[in-house]
Amino acid sequence: MARLADRQAFEHYAAQAQARWERLWAGDHWIISVGISECSIAKGALETYRHLELLLAQEGIPATLRRVGCAGWCFAEPFVEVRAPGAPPVVYGNITTDRVPELVHALKRGGVKTEWALGVRADEPFAGVQPLSQHPFLARQRRLLFADAGVIDPESIDDYIARGGYRAFLKALFEMTPEEVVAEVKASNLRGRGGAGFPAGIKWESGRRTQAWPKYVVVNSHEGEPNVFKDRRLLETNPHLVLEGLLIGCYALETPHGYNYIGGEHALAVKRFQEAVRQAYELGLLGDNILGTGFSCHIRVRTGGGAYICGEGSALMYAIMGQRGQPRTKPPRSVEEGLWKRPTVLNNTETFASVPSIVLNGGAWYASLGTEQSSGTKLVTIQGPVKRLGVAEIEMGMTMRELIFEVFGGMREGYRFKGVQTGGVSAGPLREDQLDVPVDFDSMTELGGMLGSGGFVVFDESVCAVDFARYLTAFNRYESCSKCNPCRLGNPALVEILDRVRNGYGRPQDLDIIREASKHIIELSLCGLGQVAPMPLLGMMKAFPEEFDAHIREKRCPANVCPISEAALATVGDD
Amino acid sequence: MAHRVDPDQRVDLAPLLEVLASRFRPRDDQEAYELIVGACQEAQRLYGWVPPEAAQAIADHLGVTINRIYGLLTFYADFRTEPPGKHFLWLCHGAACYVMGSSRLIELLRDRYQLEDHGVSPDGEFTLHVFNGCLGVCDLAPVIQVDHHEYWGRLTPERLEAAIEALKRGRGVEDADGTAG
């Protein structure tokens, strides 16, 4: 494939890609797509794919078999989309190998397997199957980043271009100055999706203002929290979208140096992003003198080694530089002195992925989505015993109750809702009576919760608040980078006290000691992660005081989880 | 795949040197530093751990000190500087798995198989890594990834024990796999 020399060459190429896409979907032949992503592979999607290939050949169904990305519905993986000649595409969920023969036989007979169908990609019901857009998981979602998730092949730049990809980059490159790009991002009020919520446009502006070269633009795809998996799904299902956002970022900063730092555990995300970069180079959308404009851009992919702390901005930059990923004191901020001591603009994967639609449709349009202070859409993941697990993309401002009970379907049979842990390991939980809070950057903070990166963990009555608090605190203890004392020594101390409480040796004054120690950790820790490390514990204490009380005064674990010792039990009532 | 490295045998560096020569070609010092972690990850993919010989080869190839290499190997949780057991268990201890009972799995592995985080079982069969992040397959929680490609999902201590015993007997693990049931 030759590098595209100019805009006209790109337009020509895009027209061809689009024509191929339209021919593919003209409706005159079989197309069968299987979602291949980390979580569907875990549930056997590759076997499903091979099985389908075999049986379709056996049955003489001449189908084009495609691999697409994840569509966010982990609960329905592996999914298979079937487009029969003359019929709209029907999406089937949970097609494990044992279901493949029956599905293929049904197709052979020209039928639709209604009971396995999630929905049909059409506006009207088809053969008793409701439109996919009315599926309760999707009906309340607003998909910008996930619009083509599960539709396009993530390893095909042609698919991406056929669906309008790289149009935003071209618009920026040919019709806008870098200042105008930054102005649109500023107008959109796009706030950082990694958790801090700092306005991206202001960061980009400061990056432009700093007079030192070279400059760097870095995507933070590290995602090391124990309860979120949205960024890797985004990279797995639409890597070019992130790459396009990064390219626009590099153009806005007028720099040829872009990086994506991806957690090493996310093997498929790394692989697909690298493939996207390779394809973009091949086509001439990366490299020197892109489309004859004189603008050059080179992207390097770096992978992490499994340290949560490397999601912190300054630690991440040290990690890229081949040092131990430990944060440093600020100022100077990264936009002044970051990677290799040069101005560096660092944003989350999701933030960059939001940029193309802002450039295409304008900052004002994006600002009109969501709420006034928290514009746009947000990827959220919910974990725990809910009916429909997965990644959802919602407009900011939906209430937590709607999110859990409508989008994610509420609790599974036999589980009763107790609370939802918010903000990863950096904030506290919400109780049932607090669920009417809007999901946005600011509303949850007053209740001790936090939007964070959008990972929420629903837990039921079988989970003990003290034990859960211990789990979250132990995470922070284990992942402390050990650079500064309050975090390194404070978190083990908290875990120690909690273990005492769990074993039945807790004393009433322990709760005060926890508060006091937490205060030191919060006030004296060096980085943002240390400063919030005690928050989950304090949040649990605030939300479920009666459980802490039961452990300490009655030597009793209401959820029957904690290893209260016999010896401790014998002392009940002594004091 | 299970890594089969005899700890007493010398490590065959040829495949690593080949990868380094073809894919790790820094243009300057800056890039050499940036490539260390990736090179160590390649070594671990090849050998199941980063043997001292491999660390030295990476240091020589990239022109950095061996101290720098070990500084990183001991900082990042993913790396092993000791030979692993025959099978690699990657136990997800993310919040979803915790809520669904991963702590009980950790206890079983410790009590029944003397298998601790980052340790090797006494019979040399298993290495355990407890992963504090999220494997991202929460629908299967609590979940263990086995030998880098297979998943045991929706585990209980009983099912985990059955799966381990099956693996020890050298049988396929499909019958114990949460996805098949």
Image: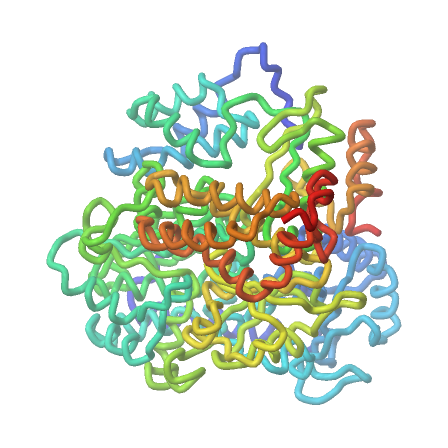
Residue A161 at x, y percent in the picture: 45, 69
Residue A536 at x, y percent in the picture: 50, 58
Quarter placement of the N terminus of chain B: top right
In the displayed structure, would residue B166 be above or below residue A425?
above
Residue at 54%, 22% (x, y): give it.
B82
Residue at 60%, 36% (x, y): give it.
B129
Q: Is residue A565 left or right of residue A210?
A: right
Name of the residue lying farthest toward the front:
A575
Residue at 40%, 35% (x, y): give it.
B37
Q: Is residue A284 left or right of residue A252?
A: right
In the displayed structure, would residue A337 be above or below residue A64?
above
Residue A204 at x, y percent in the picture: 25, 66
Front position in the image: A386 or A572: A572
Residue A534 at x, y percent in the picture: 45, 54
Name of the residue lying farthest toward the left:
A211
Front position in the image: A447 or A5: A447
Q: How many marks?
A: 0
Residue at 68%, 46% (x, y): give it.
B102
Front position in the image: B18 or B174: B174
> Is residue B135 in view from this perspective?
yes
Location of residue A334 (image quadrant): bottom left
